[in-house]
């Protein structure tokens, strides 16, 4: 019997908040003194209720949630206020008591899958350890069922693999499986679906809805996706600079925001049909979307129109099986497309569809099994070491997992400066100036230069990764879920920054993403992938307005809250 069912059978007070935070203050000790990360925060979650905390990176969302489960960093402490769980003050509870509560009473799905999964343990072993620790059945079938409920296909086989053999979205699903495995009374979900495609996102969120309905599980959802918050949360709490600035019923708050900061969040949120584009069409004028280039990009006539051509690209992996036998897995199956110079092409599809594998082959980080990649008229498989070094400067990546792609031993200055130093660009003074400019461009304070990746939030780390990719002024940028970890304000800023750079410098983007609202805003062309195959391609307007394939239609229909973010008269039209 699950802990949640036992809880209700014991007749707990349904009128009492399951989690209540009152005037919470959290400080962090630094070499320069205490830093107030959260001040006077307050929120209430009733049994079976879903409450979303929204706000930009560094606003205190995750810090507040970590305090509720007793997992603040060693230099953090609750400096004031109360955290009441089912009436018990746990703000300064002993470690023994918090261990008793974690898992079966309070579960958590952390934001960063690569740093929260043990790289030397198989996925199934990590799920089994969680089940055993909470006294639940932990056989192979139990592990497979938990992984299947989190949307992981072929769960029994996947349980025998290691985290590095999973895509980013698959790793996130493994974390979700672990967090849900014990059916906790309260689940803290920190960006639980930011790495997931919309169809799997819907599956996970439907599973959470089932838990809240049937078992009374409460969910504290930390997200930067306002559409998701509008569709799935009962209440929304808005945090800004460590304080709660507005709270209320989700639809009412997001449709009629009162606080200036909430108004900025809502106005910056991408929707399926960007309101800036929609209003322009209604008025019969050309789009005034800030993401549209204001001037045509001038390109030398001698240069090929297609800066990148992918021809019959295939990648087959060997997967370990029972008794040491291996099986072939075709991750990318005969894919062909081209990217015109100075444009943005988006590759979309479910997690595991082969999007990121294509990106790695384009970057020459993974050798194709067959087919070829032609960059600027040259087959990249023919490049020698010197030519490959020059290619690296012209084509730069922004990876999906910022924590895994940033060296934890390098401070932020050295991280961003490293490509400049590697390619012998400028001197020490000019490189420092360039780093400061890049930090400004991605909305990070220059004081961040001396900090390390573990001292930054997930969104801040992603901004560092973007700054590093821009350091060498590349011609082509491969963006693998480049804005999935960013709050809507910074996301809008970064997307506009990328658009401005494209307009001014003629940059070309290959955008790997599951966020179709972002695709609608930034992409000129879309390639839709399903199970390694390219199933649909065309201009963004054609694919979104007149999708031909059922799979594409399913992706579009699964976008959370797109209609809810529009004014009521438009949403009901």
Image: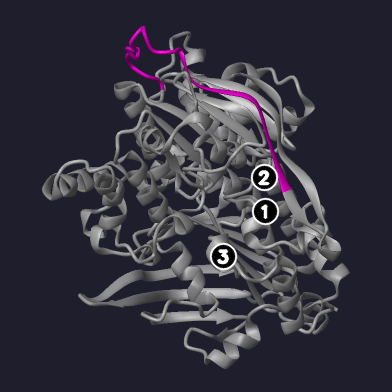
Q: CA distance from mark 1 to mark 3?
A: 14 Å
Q: Is residue 561 magenta?
A: no
Q: Are marks 1 and 2 in contact (CB under 8 Å)?
A: yes
Q: Position of residue 526 (x, y in %)?
A: 59, 24
Residue at image point 20% right, 43% down: 434
Q: CA distance from mark 1 to mark 2?
A: 7 Å
Q: Quadrant of the N terminus?
A: bottom right
Report whether residue 96 is seen: yes
Please give left or right for residue 458 compared with residue 528 in the image.
left
In the image, residue 294 sits, relative to residue 235, either above or below, namely: above
Residue at 48% x, 84% y is 91
Residue 202: mark in rendering: none
- Mark 1 / mark 2, whichever is N-terminal: 1
Q: Which residue is mark 3?
A: 110
Question: Is residue 306 a member of the stretch shown in magenta?
Answer: yes
Q: Which residue is mark 2?
A: 351
What residue lies at 65% left-to-right and 87% top-to-bottom? Answer: 100
> Which of the 4 image quadrants contains residue 179?
bottom right
Q: Which residues are magenta?
A: 292-317
Q: Is residue 141 left or right of residue 383?
A: right
Give the quarter of the figure containing the C terminus: top right
Mark 3, mark 2: which one is toward the viewer?
A: 2
Determine crowd level at label 2: few under 14, some 14-19, many 20+ residues with C-alpha closer than 10 A. many
Q: Which residue is mark 1?
A: 170
Q: Nearer the viewer, residue 351 or 254?
A: 351
């Amino acid at each position: 019997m699950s802990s949640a069912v036992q809880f209700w059978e014991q007749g707990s007070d349904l009128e009492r908040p399951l989690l209540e935070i009152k005037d919470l203050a959290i400080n962090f000790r630094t070499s320069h003194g205490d830093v107030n990360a959260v001040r006077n925060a307050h929120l209430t979650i009733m049994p079976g209720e879903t409450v979303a905390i929204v706000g930009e990176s560094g606003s205190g969302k995750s810090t507040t949630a970590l305090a509720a489960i007793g997992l603040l960093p060693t230099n953090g402490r609750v400096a004031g206020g109360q955290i009441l769980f089912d009436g018990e003050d746990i703000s300064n509870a002993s470690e023994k008591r918090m261990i008793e509560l974690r898992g079966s009473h309070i579960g958590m799905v952390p934001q960063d899958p690569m740093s929260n999964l043990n790289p030397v343990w198989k996925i199934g072993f990590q799920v089994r350890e969680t089940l055993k620790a909470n006294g639940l059945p932990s056989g192979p079938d139990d592990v497979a069922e938990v992984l299947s409920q989190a949307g992981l296909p072929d769960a029994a086989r996947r349980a025998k693999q290691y985290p590095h053999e999973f895509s980013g979205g698959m790793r996130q699903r493994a974390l979700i499986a672990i967090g849900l495995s014990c059916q906790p009374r309260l689940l803290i979900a920190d960006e639980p679906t930011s790495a997931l495609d919309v169809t799997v996102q819907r599956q996970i969120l439907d599973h959470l809805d089932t838990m809240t309905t049937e078992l009374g599980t409460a969910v504290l959802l930390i997200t930067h996706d306002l559409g998701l918050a509008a569709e799935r949360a009962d209440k929304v709490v808005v945090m800004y600079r460590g304080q709660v600035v507005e709270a209320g019923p989700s639809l009412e708050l997001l449709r009629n925001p009162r606080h200036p900061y909430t108004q900025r969040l809502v106005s910056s949120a991408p929707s399926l049909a960007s309101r800036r584009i929609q209003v322009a069409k209604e008025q019969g004028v050309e789009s005034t979307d800030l993401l549209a280039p204001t001037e045509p990009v001038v390109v030398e006539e001698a240069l090929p129109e297609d800066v990148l051509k992918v021809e019959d690209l295939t990648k087959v992996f060997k997967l370990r099986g029972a008794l040491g036998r291996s099986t072939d897995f075709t991750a990318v199956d005969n894919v062909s497309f081209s990217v015109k110079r100075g444009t943005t092409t988006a590759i979309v599809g479910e997690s595991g569809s082969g999007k990121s594998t294509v990106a790695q082959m384009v970057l020459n980080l993974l050798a194709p099994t067959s087919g070829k990649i032609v960059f600027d008229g040259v087959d990249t498989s023919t490049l020698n070491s010197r030519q490959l070094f020059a290619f690296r400067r012209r084509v730069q990546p922004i990876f999906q997992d910022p924590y895994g792609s940033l060296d934890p031993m390098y401070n932020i200055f050295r991280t961003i400066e490293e490509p400049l130093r590697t390619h012998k660009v400028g001197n020490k003074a000019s490189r420092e100036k360039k780093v400061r400019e890049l930090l400004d461009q991605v909305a990070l304070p220059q004081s961040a230069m001396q900090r390390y990746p573990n001292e930054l939030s997930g969104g801040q780390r992603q901004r560092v990764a973007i700054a590093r990719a821009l350091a060498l002024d590349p011609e082509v940028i491969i963006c693998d879920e480049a804005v999935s970890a960013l709050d809507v304000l910074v996301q809008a800023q970064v997307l506009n920054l990328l658009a401005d750079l494209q307009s001014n410098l003629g940059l070309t983007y290959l955008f790997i993403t599951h966020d179709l609202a972002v695709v609608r805003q930034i992409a000129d062309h879309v390639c839709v992938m399903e199970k390694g195959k390219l199933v649909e391609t065309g201009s963004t307007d054609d694919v979104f307005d007149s999708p031909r394939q059922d799979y594409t239609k399913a992706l579009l229909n699964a976008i959370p809250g797109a209609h809810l973010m529009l004014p009521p008269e438009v949403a009901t039209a």
